[in-house]
Structures are given as C-alpha cells and as structure tokens.
Image (cartoon, grey):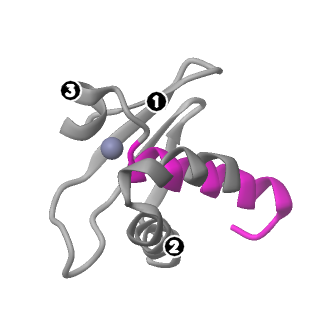
Amino acid sequence: MEEIIRYEVGKGMVGSVRNKVRAFIENGCVVQVGPKSWIVRPIPGYNKTTYEVTSDGSFFRCSCQYNRTKGLVCSHILAVTEYIKMRRLGYA
Ligand SMILES: [Zn+2]
C-alpha cells in the first residue's frame, strides 16, 4: 500500500486516493468474481459505476477511463490490491 501510494505523490492525490480506497473497503465494494477478477462497486452517495478489475498475475487492469486511457494505477486497482492483502491477513 505505502509503495503504491507513494507512486501517486507527484499527482497530488495521496490523501484523496487513500480515503477513497478505505471507503471502497469499508463499504464492502470490492467483490471477487473470479480467480483473477474483481468488481469494485460504487461507494454509496459518491459514484454510480461498477468497475471491473482483472489481473494477469503481475499487472492489474481496470475498466475505468483513468486506467484505460492513461494507463495509471487507479483507486479501484488500489482497492483490489488492498482487499487482497487484507484477505491474506484474514481481515476481509
Ligand atoms: Zn479504475
């Protein structure tokens, strides 16, 4: 988590991304739907779109415009990677 967030530092999104990732997790928005695929449901009252995140084992891709057009790590991917980490630790 810390390493990924640092990646965003130059873009001035640290606080907002961190809060958004936390909100996705706390609202149960991240749901695993396949061995290497997840959906990130909208945060109630914040957004209305469900995004799909998939992994090829090394890289994550997201269906959102931010990831598809800019190729940058988005909040949905961060939410999924955090979710995976929490599951490994037994918290989710
Ligand atoms: Zn995304």
Quadrant housing residue 1? bottom right
Instruction: Let me know if residue 56 is in the magenta part.
Output: no
Q: Amino acid at mark 1?
A: Thr
The residue to which callout 2 is attached is 22
On whether ligand 1 comes within 8 Å of the CB at mark 2, the answer is no
Q: Is residue 86 left or right of residue 15?
A: right
Disc 1 on helix, strand or loop? strand
Against 78, is 41 above or below?
below
Q: Give the magenta part as a residue range.
A: 74-92
- Percent across and percent down for residue 37 are 49, 34
Ligand 1 sits in which quadrant? top left
- Going from N to C along the chain, the mark reached first, 1 or 3, is 1
Mark 1 or mark 3: which is in front? 3
Q: Amino acid at mark 2?
A: Arg
Q: Is residue 31 visible?
A: yes
- Going from N to C along the chain, the mark reached first, 1 or 2, is 2
The residue to which callout 1 is attached is 54
Query: Gap between marks 1 and 2, in whole Å?
Result: 20 Å
The residue to which callout 3 is attached is 69
Identify the residue shown where x is 68% and y is 56%.
2
